[in-house]
């Protein structure tokens, strides 16, 4: 069953524009429901930075990556701060999937997170947002006021906590 949903996640990620050879940051990656599929897409020429503060979930992700023989995932443990330990303009794609229950609209860390995402994103980067647990219109406004513009939306069956459900992904570009 998990394999089938990993394939579905690969299809979704390809549809939103992830390609072979890209560098991807999966911020708040959890146990890797999207990390593993994106690593398969970007291949050996690409790189996936998997950042999370949950050590147990990161350990699970590491085991899943080993079982899948994926060597292009770099696990980044964090204590929950919003500083992203990557160089300026070093990332082609940032995934912000189901993280907004950690960063609600009123949280003072949200603008800092968006500032960091802007900093690490290349000029033509894709910022892909799965706005679960938050008012997506207000989040969209906050993201746009942080230097991004809404490119498109993807609607369909997504993975949430490893289970399929209907949802929407918002894809942003970087204003330069």
Image: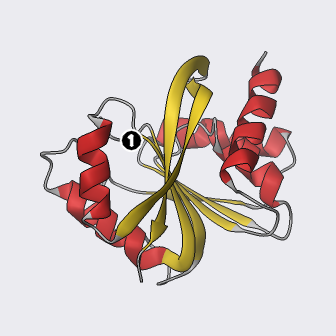
- Label 1: which residue? 99
Q: Is residue 145 left or right of residue 160?
A: left
**Mark 1 Cα-neighbour bin, 10 Å: few <14, some 14–19, many ≥20:** some
Along the viewing direction, whichever of 40 and 137 lies nearer the viewer: 137
Residue 53 in percent (x, y) is at 41, 47
- For the C terminus, give its image quadrant: bottom left
Q: Is residue 128 left or right of residue 142?
A: right
What residue do we see at 74% from left, 25% from top?
A: 5
Residue 171 in percent (x, y) is at 51, 53
Q: Is residue 154 left or right of residue 113?
A: right
What residue do we see at 72% from left, 68% from top?
A: 22
Q: How many marks?
A: 1
Along the viewing direction, whichever of 170 and 24 lies nearer the viewer: 170
| Numbered disc 1: secondary structure | loop
What residue do we see at 31% from left, 58% from top?
A: 143
Q: Is residue 7 visible to the viewer in this orientation of the structure?
A: yes
């Amino acid at each position: 069953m998990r394999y089938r949903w990993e394939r579905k996640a690969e299809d979704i990620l390809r549809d939103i524009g992830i390609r072979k050879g890209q560098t991807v940051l999966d911020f708040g990656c959890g146990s890797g429901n999207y990390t593993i599929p994106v690593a398969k897409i970007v291949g050996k020429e690409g790189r996936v930075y998997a950042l999370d503060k949950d050590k147990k979930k990161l350990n699970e992700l590491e085991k899943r990556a080993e079982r899948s023989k994926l060597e292009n995932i770099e696990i980044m443990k964090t204590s929950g701060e919003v500083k992203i330990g990557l160089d300026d303009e070093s990332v082609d794609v940032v995934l912000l999937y189901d993280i907004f229950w950690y960063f609600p609209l009123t949280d003072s860390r949200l603008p800092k997170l968006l500032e960091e995402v802007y900093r690490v994103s290349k000029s033509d980067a894709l910022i892909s947002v799965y706005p679960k647990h938050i008012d997506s219109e207000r989040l969209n406004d906050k993201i746009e006021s942080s230097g991004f513009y809404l490119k498109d939306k993807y609607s369909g069956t997504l993975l949430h906590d490893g289970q399929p459900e209907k949802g929407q992904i918002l894809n942003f570009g970087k204003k330069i």
